[in-house]
Amino acid sequence: MKDHFEYHQELFQRFDETLEAFLKQTPDHDPQSCTETLALLEQTRTAMTQREDYPELGQRLLSRVVAHFPAFTPHVQRDLFWFFGGDCLHYLGDDEIEKFQRLEERYFDSDEQADYADLRAQVFGLH
């Protein structure tokens, strides 16, 4: 059973691995942009591990990925845009935002005892 943070931390870990591999195998991008993105990825990774300051760093990282590496954007789980919030919400459609809001309400109304992934599947019609 995964809680809200654990679920998103797992998604971030997969995003982290995929983005790092993408950046290292993308020679046609500006090397400085790749280096700066990798540095921000490392900062966000550390913040997620320590559970401190990760929302702001995550927003900056995802916004940077969308702006500098649009070909990678389809590989970003929509849940991460919601999780980090802020400017990242601009990358979600109104219908997605509505579903994520319902999911959050159901999760936090359950006194956080429910499995977040299971509730997500129910709200998004995956069950």
Image (tube, rainbow, N blue to C red):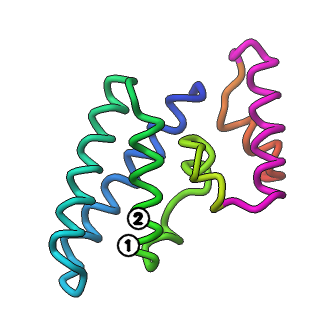
User: At x 37% / y 32%, what residue is drawn?
Assistant: 48
Q: How many labels does the image show?
A: 2
Helix, strand or loop at label 2? It is helix
Residue 125, image x, y percentages:
84, 52
Q: How crowded is mark 1: few (under 14 residues within 10 Å), some or many (20 or more)?
A: some
- Left or right of 98: which side holds 78? left
- Between 121 and 45, the residue placed more toward the observer is 45
- Between 46 and 9, the residue placed more toward the observer is 46
Which mark is on residue 84? none
Q: In this view, does 38 lie above or below 53?
A: below
Under mark 1, the amino acid is His
Magenta span dominant secondary structure: helix
Is residue 52 among what the camera can see?
A: yes
Is residue 115 highlighted in magenta?
no
- Between 84 and 75, the residue placed more toward the observer is 84
Under mark 2, the amino acid is Val
Residue interval drawn in magenta: 92-113
Residue that numbered label 2 is attached to: 65
Which mark is on residue 68? 1
CB within 8 Å, label 1 to label 2:
yes
Q: In this view, does 116 lie above or below 110?
A: below
